[in-house]
């Protein structure tokens, strides 16, 4: 099984699983998991391929539906979720594919493109997250009847969907001051005492696919050893950096403050009785064994006074007729190598190359609150450890290189809280606007339903 972060693999609801095959690719905001058929999976029941629907003259085949269904069924199985009736699931998957196909067509009609260099970077990122080579990724895909070309085009479509959403929806969302005042009042008066935001840290010991009972026992013992060290008084973050195999180990295992519905239900249930600072586990998921710590818990709604701020600097190259996205990536990759090798200082490189107002400050963006940057930028920044430099990433502004300088806990002023509330409201309105936009795109598409999928 090709798997990504344990958080997404263990938390997906059926509604989320119905989204397209996914990855986190070079700074694009894309849903974080892609599960592919595991080695040795039984595919003897795969039906012959045929067209099940046509969207504006573009076909959707039975195998398109079955490939998506297989991913969903494996992810539901990994998290112990109830399996819906196959006919019902097939219809839901087909509806989702029709909507996606219409949206991708709209993106192409609007001239939105994904360059080959960006697509190759996305494929490499998928392989890296699964700790395999691109060649091994290709082999596993094709062994299960998923052509490598089909896989790449699926990634391309998802990247197109992310970009068309940014252009057609998110940039058009406007927040008025009366709207913001009303939103803040609603959050302050929120009567739902069960609506919490939590920050959970984890130490993950991965259990490989097809591990023997003896291997599982050894890995469980390793996770119990980590739990014992923490309960004996060792710093959780230190143990996480030494022993955890999750991507967030560089942050001491902390996964960030977020609503409970954005965490795996397994994590929420395991920590709900803990006081802040409490530790539980190991608990078992489809990915492995987890030792969990409740770092922070607060009432959801209006952001609280205490937040984690980040101070970063960046180099921005804008994409235009004179500079393609691939050229910008190549230039920033070369600069990153020079910085890592000590031939260049990041601040000097920013002053000499960045096409941003922060260039004269060496790219320094100052202290930033959560939600201050665009999601694709913030997502990459939040994954960095202090001093670390990112790979080049794409945002709506161009291609960036980011270096995280430091993080701190701070108390926000009333004005800063208001700006955080503005960011929360904008995200909420963008979600609502996207639903309306997607419904309109679907309504305007010509859809011909043929034989039902099976």
Image (cartoon, helix red, strand yellow):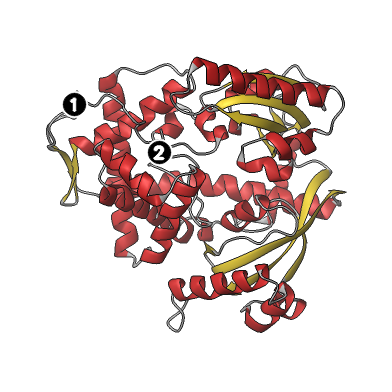
Q: Residues within 10 Å of mark 2 (few under 14, many from 20)?
A: some
Give the answer, above or below, for where 122 lies relative to 231: below
Decide which of 102, 339 is in the foreground and name it.
339
Decide which of 278, 217 is in the foreground and name it.
217
The residue at the point 48 percent across, 52 percent down is: 125
Can residue 193 be spotted in the picture? no
Percent position of residue 371, x then y: 67, 52
- Precedes in sequence: disc 2 or disc 1: 2
Provide the residue designation for mark 2: 19
Give the answer, above or below, for where 47 lies relative to 250: above
Give the answer, above or below, for where 116 lies relative to 218: below
Can residue 58 be spotted in the picture? yes
Percent position of residue 424, x then y: 65, 46
Provide the residue designation for mark 1: 454
Where, quadrant-wise, is the N terminus in this rendering? top left
Percent position of residue 257, x then y: 71, 38
Q: Quadrant of residue 96?
A: top left
């Amino acid at each position: 099984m090709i798997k990504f972060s344990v958080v997404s693999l263990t938390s997906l609801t059926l509604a989320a699983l119905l989204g397209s095959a996914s990855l986190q690719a070079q700074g694009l905001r894309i849903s974080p998991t892609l599960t592919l058929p595991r080695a040795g999976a039984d595919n003897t029941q795969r039906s012959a391929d045929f067209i099940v629907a046509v969207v504006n003259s573009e076909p959707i085949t039975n195998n398109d539906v079955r490939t998506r269904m297989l991913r969903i069924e494996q992810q539901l199985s990994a998290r112990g979720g109830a399996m819906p009736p196959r006919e019902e699931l097939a219809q839901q998957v087909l509806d989702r594919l029709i909507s996606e196909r219409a949206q991708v067509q709209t993106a192409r009609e609007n001239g939105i493109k994904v360059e080959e260099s960006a697509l190759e970077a996305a494929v490499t990122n998928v392989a890296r997250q699964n700790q395999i080579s691109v060649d091994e990724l290709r082999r596993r895909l094709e062994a299960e009847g998923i052509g490598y070309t089909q896989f790449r085009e699926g990634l391309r479509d998802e990247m197109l969907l992310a970009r068309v959403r940014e252009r057609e929806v998110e940039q058009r969302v406007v927040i008025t001051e009366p709207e913001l005042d009303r939103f803040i009042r609603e959050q302050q008066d929120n009567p739902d005492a069960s609506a919490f935001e939590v920050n959970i840290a984890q130490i993950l010991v991965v259990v490989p696919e097809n591990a023997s009972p003896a291997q599982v026992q050894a890995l469980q013992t390793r996770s119990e050893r980590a739990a014992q060290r923490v309960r004996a008084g060792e710093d959780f973050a230190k143990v996480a950096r030494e022993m955890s195999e999750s991507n967030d180990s560089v942050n001491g295992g902390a996964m960030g403050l977020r609503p409970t519905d954005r965490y795996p239900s397994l994590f929420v249930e395991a920590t709900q009785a803990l006081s802040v600072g409490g530790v539980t586990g190991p608990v078992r998921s489809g990915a492995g064994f987890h030792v969990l710590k409740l770092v922070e818990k607060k009432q959801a709604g209006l952001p609280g006074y205490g937040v984690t701020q980040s101070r970063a600097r960046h180099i921005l190259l804008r994409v235009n007729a004179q500079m393609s996205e691939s050229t910008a990536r190549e230039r920033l990759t070369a600069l990153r190598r020079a910085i890592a090798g000590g031939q260049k200082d990041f601040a000097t490189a920013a002053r000499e190359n960045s096409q941003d107002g922060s260039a004269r400050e060496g790219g320094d963006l100052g202290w930033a609150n959560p939600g201050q940057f665009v999601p694709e930028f913030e997502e990459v920044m939040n994954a960095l450890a202090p001093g670390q430099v990112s790979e080049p990433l794409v945002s709506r502004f161009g291609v960036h290189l980011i270096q995280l300088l430091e993080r701190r806990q701070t108390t926000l002023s009333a004005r800063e809280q208001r700006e955080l509330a503005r960011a929360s409201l904008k995200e909420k309105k963008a979600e609502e606007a996207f639903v309306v936009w997607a419904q309109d795109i679907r309504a305007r598409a010509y859809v011909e339903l043929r034989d039902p999928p099976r």
